[in-house]
Amino acid sequence: MKPILQNLVEMTGHRDHLRLEVSVLSTLQSLSSIVQVRSLEVFTRDGELFMRPRTWMDNGQWMSAESEAATDPQAQAIAQIPALHECIESRAAHAIAMLGKGRHCMWLPVWMQDKVTTCLEVIQSRPFSSQKIDIITSVFHVYKNYQSLLDYSERDALTGLFNRKTFDEQFSRFTSPEASERQPIPSDSETIDDAAHQWLAVVDIDHFKQVNDRFGHLYGDEVLILVANILRSSFRSHDRIFRFGGEEFVVLLRSTSLSTAHKVFNRFRKNVEDYYFPQVGQVTVSVGFVSTANGSPVEILGQADQALYFAKENGRNQVRFYDDLVAEGHLQAKVSNDDVELF
């Protein structure tokens, strides 16, 4: 029992979802007879539930999936696993099935806002005893409760998006050397614009103050919630979306070429323009974006902000790229050193 308690103490000391997930998997892995533990990401494709490995151990090292879930070749339809499918359909706490000789599996779905987002998978070499099930489910409940606390502290209360407080950590991970190493290397036939980069966009709702003044803050809040929903549906699961406060949002777009980034941001802009907002009618957004390749979060945010405000001052309802505006002479690039930024 002592090792389990030590692992639980370590688990509740984390302030990051991925580290928390690795910690609960390590705790379960330490139990007797356990052969394998994994975290499975659950997602919808063509109206059907699928799952794919998200965190697992390989040669003694914990690995985490970085590719988009929908295109992962390891994705498997949950309908192909009757016990797990029935468990999710009936909203049961867990499912148990025998996979083969010496392989007994237990699945524990994680529900968030009436939707299964993750499933922990525990495989052991013998049937699960009632005592073993109690231990596993108890560890799982501690994990779920702490995950909910983390999620609450990281997210904006109104929209459910990540909040400003979590941006720095997410940005740091997003632009880490490890993330850059995972990007595909452009071939000789590719131009620099075709190479995959990380991008940061600042999104601002046009004339939002007029919405609040004319229709009231209740309808203003509804516009924010609906724009947040459009943001979620317009970007991939491994991109990151934040509400910075007021009517401003930030998007981190991963491993995409410049031409595709233009298309993706413009598609989102058009999705907002085409949406009918109850009572308010049409709403538009302006977007400024920049590569995250060079500079601190503050510098990059500042560049995206400059592009955004150029868009707002020159017609609104448009997407502008910072480097293009500098090349065209509309903006002047900042010169900076380690201590002082010069404008």
Image (cartoon, grey):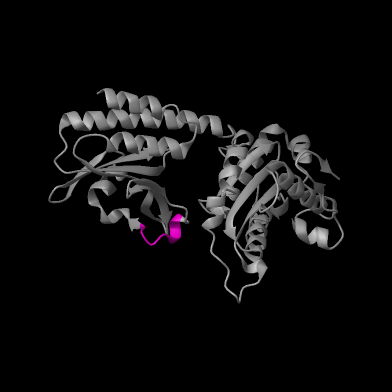
| Identity of the residue furthest to the front in this view | 338
Res 326 quadrant in image: bottom right
Where, by quadrant of the figure, is residue 11 drawn? top left
In the rendered image, the residue lying farthest to the left is 101
Quadrant where the image shows the C terminus:
top right
Q: Is residue 166 above or below residue 55?
A: above
Q: Could you tell me how many numbered marks the image carries?
A: 0
Tell me if I can see residue 335 in this picture. yes
Residue furthest to the bottom: 189
- Percent x, y of residue 20: 42, 35
Near-viewer residue (289 or 208): 289
Q: Is residue 179 left or right of residue 21?
A: right
| Residue 186 lies within the magenta run | no
Determine if the magenta segment contains residue 74: yes
Percent across and percent down for residue 261 are 64, 60
Q: Is residue 93 visible?
A: no
Give the residues drawn in magenta, as a range: 69-75
Image position of 34 (left or right of 237):
left
Vertical arrangement, residue 72 with respect to residue 190, above or below? above
The residue nearer to you, when weighing 72 against 343, is: 343
Residue drawn 30% across the image and 45% down it: 89
135 lies above or below 65: above
In the rendered image, residue 309, in percent from the top left (x then y), is placed at: 80, 48
Task: Tell me residue 286's x, y (percent).
Answer: 74, 51
Left of 191 or right of it: where is 7? left
- Residue drawn at 42 percent across, 57 percent down: 45
Residue drawn 27% across the image and 35% down it = 30
Work out which quarter of the rendered image holds the N terminus and state it. top left
